[in-house]
Amino acid sequence: MPKYKFDIKHILFDEDVEAMFKAANTPQERAAVSLLWITGARPGEVLEIRKQDVDVLPEKVRITIPTLKLGSKNKKFKVDKRTLEFERGDNKFLNYLIAYTLNLKNPTD
């Protein structure tokens, strides 16, 4: 992951994310905005996240993000994964994501 010399919060403010969240037309879109903001994942990565990739525990939430990587010799793509953990608390976006995930019926949604 590239190292940036600035904090994204100096460019994108909570109010901007809140406006995107409110402008989302569906629960799925609000979950995507929440995932983007919480994890910093790329939009293509967020589209690949499924219910089974979000592990809701009593004190924390573990999100596994699938990432496509280009192989070196045979130029084929392979799926790499990274796991992020977040403490549960007052984060509106994380709490929305938890509620959305728990309401999904199919683990591949």
Image: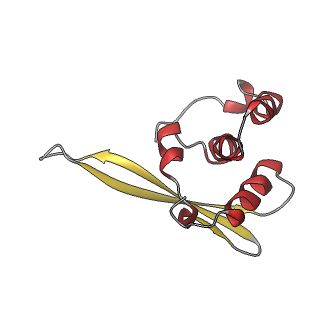
* Figure disc tally: 0
* Left/right of residue 71 with respect to residue 22 in the rendered view: left
Could you tell me which residue is drawn at 76 percent across and 60 percent down?
99
Nearer to us in this view, 41 or 19: 19
Above or below: residue 98 compared with residue 58: above
Could you tell me which residue is drawn at 32 percent across and 46 percent down?
69
Could you tell me which residue is drawn at 70 percent across and 66 percent down?
102
Nearer to us in this view, 47 or 94: 47
* Left/right of residue 72 with respect to residue 8 in the rendered view: left
Q: Quadrant of residue 60?
A: bottom right
* Left/right of residue 52 with respect to residue 89 in the rendered view: left
* Left/right of residue 17 with respect to residue 72 in the rendered view: right
Q: Quadrant of residue 34?
A: top right
Q: Quick one: which residue is furthest to the top in this view?
A: 11
Could you tell me which residue is drawn at 72 percent across and 27 percent down?
12
Nearer to us in this view, 18 or 83: 18
Report x, y in % for residue 83: 53, 61
Report x, y in % for residue 4: 55, 32
Q: Quick one: which residue is furthest to the right in this view?
A: 90
Report x, y in % for residue 44: 47, 40
